[in-house]
Image (tube, rainbow, N blue to C red):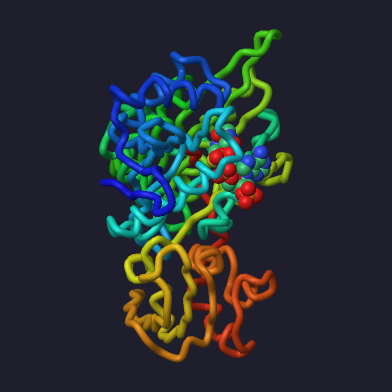
Amino acid sequence: MKHADAASDIEYVEHDAPRDHAAVVRMLRHAFASDPEGIEAWMKIGGEGNFRTLVDSSRPAATLLRIPMGQYFGGRSVKMLGIAGVAVAPEDRGRGYAGRMMRACVRAAHGEGWPLVGLYASTHTLYRSVGFEHAGHRFQYTIPMSQIDAGAHNGERIEPLDHESAEVRECYAKFAARYDGPLDRGPYIWQRIKSPRGEEHHPFGVRDEHGALRGYVFVNQKRRPDGRADVSLSDFVFHTAAAGRRLWALLADYSMMSHDLEFFGGPTHPALLLLGQQRYDIVNKDTWLIRVSHVKAALEARGYAPCVRAQVHLEIADDLVPANTGRWTLTIESGKGCVEQGGRGEIRVGARGLAAIYSGLLTPAHAANVGLATGEHTALQAANSAFAGGAPWMSDHF
Ligand SMILES: CC(C)(COP(=O)(O)OP(=O)(O)OC[C@H]1O[C@@H](n2cnc3c(N)ncnc32)[C@H](O)[C@@H]1OP(=O)(O)O)[C@@H](O)C(=O)NCCC(=O)NCCS
C-alpha cells in the first residue's frame, strides 16, 4: 500500500528488503545505539514484513515497525497497532521526515480499520502533533528481597512451566482483561516476556488444589560482583490472593542469595497490595500514548461498566483523519457501546483529548482542565462515569 505525499516525491510504503534493509539497519543503529547484530535480531523478531519505509525519491528516509496486537479496555480486547523503532538517519533529522511518516502511518491504520495505534515515545511533541496523547503509565518497582513479607508456603503447588504453553497465555488474558491498558499480546510481546533484551526468564506457575493454573512469574537472576544476584520479573500474574502469596513465597526463597527484586506495572500492581509494608521504590519509567485511529471502531470495541446506561454526545475534530471528524453519539448499555453519527456534540475534543479520555487516564472534566476538551460543566461531569475504570497501565514495553 502506498500513501504518497501530495507535495513531493515522498511515499510511505511497505518495506522492500533488497532496497531498504541496509539503510534501515543503519537508521536503527544510530537511533537506538545498538550493534548491527542486535538490530538484525530485533528485526527478525518484529518480522521484516511489518516494517514500513518513508522513501524520498526512492531513497529510504525513515522507518518504523508495526506490531499487531490488542489492548484491554473495559474488559474487552481492542485491536491496537503498536509502533516501535521510529528512526531517521542523523543526517536527515529535522527535515520533517518523521512527522510525515507518522501522519501516513495513522491514515493507513485508519484505512485498514485499526481502532487504535499505540506507542512509547522518546519525544511526545512528535506524536502529539499527529493526535497521540498520554494514555497510561508503566512504573518500575524495586524491592529489597529481604523486605518481602507477603509470602505463604500454603497448599498451592509451584511448578516450572513451558514458555509457550497455552495455559500461560490463558492465565495472562484472564488477569489482563481485569485492568485497563494491559496488552493483548502477540508473538512479539511474548518473545519479550520470555527473553527481554536476550536474557532468558524462567516461568514458574502456581496451581490450585484442582490443578488449575492460578498465576505465574517469569524470573531472571543477574549476578553482582559480590556473588549475590538481582532478581527481575518480566511478568507477575495471578487470579487469587492465595496464588499471589504463594508466588511471593517463591520469590522470597531467592532472598538468601539476592539483593533486589525488580518488576513493572501501574501506579500500583496487585502484587504490591499483598505486601505488609511499603518497603519498595517506584519510578515512573514510561508514559505510553495511544491514538484513536478509527472513532467508531474504537468506541464500539472497548467494554464499559455494565451498570452504566448513558448517552455521550461528542464533537470530534480530527485534521488528519477527516472521517473521524463530526458529531458522534455513543450509547452505552449492558457493557457495550453503539456509535452513530450526529447528536448534540456536547463534549468537544480533538484526537488527543479523545485518546486520553478513551483510555480512562483523564475523565472528560479532567481533559477540559488541561485544554484537551471543552463543554458545559454538567455535560462533562455527566460523561465522567462512561469511561471510568482503574488507572490505565501496562507492564510491557515495545
Ligand atoms: C525522533 C526522530 C524520529 C525525529 O525525526 P525527524 O525526522 O528529525 O523529525 P521531524 O523533523 O519530522 O520533527 C517532527 C517533530 O518531532 C519533534 N522533534 C524532532 N526532533 C526533536 C528533538 N531533537 N528533540 C525534541 N523534539 C524533536 C518536534 O516536535 C518536531 O516538530 P517541530 O519541528 O514542528 O517542532 C529522530 O530524531 C530519531 O530518529 N531519533 C532517534 C530515535 C528516536 O528517538 N525515535 C523515536 C522513538 S519513539
Q: Is residue 235 visible?
A: no
- The number of numbered badges drawn on the structure is 0
- 261 or 179, which is in the foreground? 179
**Most foreground residue, 239 or 131:** 131
Give the image location of residue 146, x and y in percent. Answer: 69, 29
Say if 215 sits above or below 193 in the image: below
**Against 18, is 109 above or below?**
below
Figure quarter occupied by ligand 1: top right
Residue 172 appears in which quarter of the rendering? top left
Rendered residue at 39%/43% (across/down)? 9
**Residue placed most toward the observer, 148 or 391:** 391
User: Is 274 located above or below residue 177 in the figure?
Assistant: above
Name the residue: 44% across, 14% down. 37
Question: Residue 180, can we see it?
Answer: yes
Give the percent coordinates (x, y) of residue 235.
47, 37
| 30 or 66: nearer the viewer | 30
Q: Is residue 142 left or right of residue 329?
A: right
Res 392 quadrant in image:
bottom right
Where residue 79 appears, as percent x and y from the top left, is 33, 55
Please indicate whether residue 277 sits to the left or right of residue 325 in the image.
right
Residue drawn at point x = 33 percent, y = 57 percent? 114
Q: Residue at horizontal 48%, vertical 21%?
A: 26
**Above or below, comparing residue 217 to residue 107 in the picture:** above
